[in-house]
Image (spheres, rainbow, N blue to C red):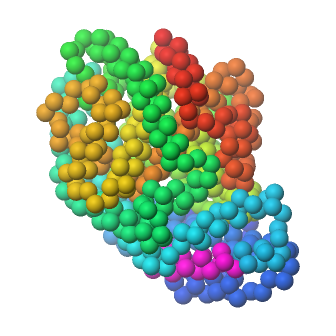
């Protein structure tokens, strides 16, 4: 991108003026980027203050490069059918990032060598050093090209799903727009919508399986190049999961199977009885069980934005002001439209130190929760934006999701902005039921991914059968899937994390337990809970994961000891 093609996102004022980088640099030009890296690599370091300054200059470079990539990604996901935007992102992934990775490794080596000669304060830099050593242990030059291939395949996944539309009820609908029909009281409409959506995904089944097969082979090779047994082990290290193990994740799976699946069974049985049906089908789980129409919190996206702003103002004036500023700066792209990538995310424009929220709102209750969720991520980014080191502005993912999931629960106390009292209660009831389900879904996705990468030589059919086995373990047979075996076997295709960010899912389960603890605290003292929440967010990743949880007044634990009382609290609330 040349400076004459700057988007509004790039025109955001920088958090602070550049001191090391040129005022203007084109991050799409590999030679310009390499020259900056080489300048850092060539600088002599003769004291601890010089090392600290070197780190700050490296942070400035990482910050600007990260923002350049984020802008390109935002553009691409907002318009997957725009070839120019796709090519610009692809060029960045193919040309710039592969050139940077080996240079980053060299910077890591230079830093650790200098730190041996000029030790920095271990109270502040110990975590940074641990991550740098882990990254150095994993880095292999031969993996750079393979990781680039994986990133480009991830872009292809976005393009495939962004192009999926369905002609339903006389109108072309996106996949997110089809979701609202699953809330209709008319069972025939729900079934037709569910089947139409599933059939549309099945049209690309072979293409998606082939795409994933390529990803799987590349990821397995990457792990083995790094001298590791499989990609499970590789990704654990790559995600800097220092505070828990794969065995801990398996204990989580077992606890969910024993404690949460039975509660979900009770919830579904009560739903079946209320709906007066013999068996629940996949299109029966989202609709109101008493036959009431879907909750309609807003008609236009502008109403959603204004309503959520008012929720935050009622909850905390500072949070309300921060959200208002995001509105003013155009940092929200919330409507669903053709060509837009699926899902929702929050990303940070690192040099401006401002968050950006992307989602696909269609006028349903879940849209309110999604915006509350992504706003929690945004508040986290703003709270930790003061850290001089770029690396400390990004908390571990397990705690990032505490920030977002807590905001869903805390925001639920103010839904009178959108609803009358009865509908407000309905919305919170739905939220609690979904929290039970998401704990199960997290275990399902995580266990499935463990099987995938521990058995990398499998076929697409074997993968489909493994998916069905894992689903059955976690209660899929509580629904009637008869005649839908092919659709059920490919259901995992819709989970973009499996394709794009493998093993990023257990974080949702760990964080949900943290968020439920905060919710329980807030019921007793909202002000105190919010104060601790914001204090913990401000730490970024400058402290270990258990300390981040402790700062928010939470236990970092996902064993039965923690899960059992939380499930009991939900059960009481639902009753």
Determine whether, in the image, residue 91 is placed left or right of residue 305. left
Please provide percent x and percent y for residue 29: 51, 83
Find the magenta span and give its range: 92-110
- State the residue at coordinates (74%, 28%): 527
Look at the magenta stretch and give its main secondary structure.
helix
Please provide percent x and percent y for residue 509: 50, 38
- State the residue at coordinates (48%, 61%): 234
Image height of 118 relative to 482, above or below: below
Q: Looking at the image, which is closer to me, 267 or 457?
A: 457
Residue 117 shown in magenta: no
Determine whether, in the image, residue 458 is placed left or right of residue 381. left
Count of marks overlaid on the render: 0
Quarter holding residue 162: bottom left
Q: Tell me, yes or no, if residue 368 can be seen here.
A: no
Q: Looking at the image, which is closer to me, 418 or 36?
A: 36
Please provide percent x and percent y for residue 271: 33, 16
Q: Tell me, yes or no, if residue 535 can be seen here.
A: yes
Q: Looking at the image, which is closer to me, 427 or 392?
A: 392
Determine whether, in the image, residue 287 is placed left or right of residue 117. left
Please provide percent x and percent y for residue 500: 40, 57
Image height of 46 relative to 217, above or below: below
Image height of 14 relative to 116, above or below: above
- State the residue at coordinates (60%, 76%): 104
Quarter holding residue 559: top right
Residue 94 shown in magenta: yes
- State the residue at coordinates (62%, 53%): 242
């Amino acid at each position: 991108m040349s400076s004459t093609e700057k988007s509004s996102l790039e025109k955001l004022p920088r958090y602070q003026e550049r001191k090391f980088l040129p005022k203007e640099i084109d991050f799409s030009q590999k030679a310009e980027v390499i020259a900056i890296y080489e300048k850092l690599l060539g600088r002599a370091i003769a004291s601890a203050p010089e090392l600290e300054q070197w780190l700050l200059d490296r942070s400035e470079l990482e910050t600007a490069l990260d923002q350049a990539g984020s802008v390109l990604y935002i553009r691409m996901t907002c318009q997957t059918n725009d070839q120019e935007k796709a090519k610009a992102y692809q060029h960045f992934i193919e040309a710039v990032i592969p050139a940077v990775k080996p240079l980053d490794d060299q910077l890591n080596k230079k830093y650790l060598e200098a730190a041996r000669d000029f030790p920095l304060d271990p109270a502040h830099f110990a975590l940074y050093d641990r991550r740098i050593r882990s990254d150095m242990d994993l880095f292999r030059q031969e993996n750079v090209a393979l990781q680039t291939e994986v990133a480009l395949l991830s872009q292809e996944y976005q393009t495939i799903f962004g192009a999926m539309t369905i002609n339903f009820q006389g109108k072309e609908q996106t996949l997110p727009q089809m979701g609202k029909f699953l809330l209709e009281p008319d069972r025939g409409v729900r079934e037709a919508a569910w089947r139409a959506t599933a059939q549309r995904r099945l049209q690309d089944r072979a293409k998606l399986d082939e795409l994933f097969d390529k990803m799987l082979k590349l990821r397995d090779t990457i792990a083995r190049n790094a001298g590791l047994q499989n990609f499970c082990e590789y990704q654990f290290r790559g995600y800097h999961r220092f505070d828990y193990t794969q065995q801990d994740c398996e204990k989580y799976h077992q606890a969910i199977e024993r404690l949460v699946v039975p509660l979900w069974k009770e919830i579904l049985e009560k739903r079946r009885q209320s709906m007066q049906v013999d068996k629940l089908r996949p299109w029966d789980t989202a609709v109101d069980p008493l036959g009431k129409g879907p909750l309609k919190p807003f008609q236009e996206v502008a109403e959603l934005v204004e309503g959520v702003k008012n929720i935050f103002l009622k909850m905390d004036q500072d949070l309300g002001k921060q959200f208002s500023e995001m509105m003013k700066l155009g940092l929200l792209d919330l409507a669903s439209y053709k060509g837009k990538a699926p899902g929702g995310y929050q990303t940070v424009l690192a040099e401006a130190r401002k968050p950006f929220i992307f989602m696909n709102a269609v006028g349903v209750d879940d849209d309110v929760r999604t915006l509350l969720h992504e706003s929690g991520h945004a508040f986290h980014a703003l709270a930790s934006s003061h850290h001089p080191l770029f690396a400390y502005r990004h908390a571990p993912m397990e705690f990032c999701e505490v920030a977002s999931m807590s905001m869903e629960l805390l925001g639920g106390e103010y839904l009178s902005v959108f609803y009358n009292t009865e509908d407000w209660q309905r919305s919170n009831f739905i939220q609690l039921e979904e929290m039970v389900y998401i704990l199960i879904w997290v275990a399902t996705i995580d266990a499935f991914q463990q099987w995938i990468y521990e058995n990398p030589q499998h076929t697409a059919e074997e993968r489909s059968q493994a998916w069905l086995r894992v689903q059955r373990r976690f209660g899929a047979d509580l629904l009637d899937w008869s005649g839908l075996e092919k659709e059920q076997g490919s259901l995992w295709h819709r989970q973009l994390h499996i394709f794009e960010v493998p093993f990023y899912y257990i974080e949702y389960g760990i964080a949900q337990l943290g968020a439920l603890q905060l919710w329980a605290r807030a019921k007793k003292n909202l002000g105190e809970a919010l104060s601790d929440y914001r204090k913990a967010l401000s730490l970024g990743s400058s402290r270990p994961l258990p300390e981040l949880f402790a700062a928010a007044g939470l236990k970092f634990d996902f064993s039965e000891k923690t899960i059992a009382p939380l499930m009991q609290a939900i059960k009481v609330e639902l009753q």
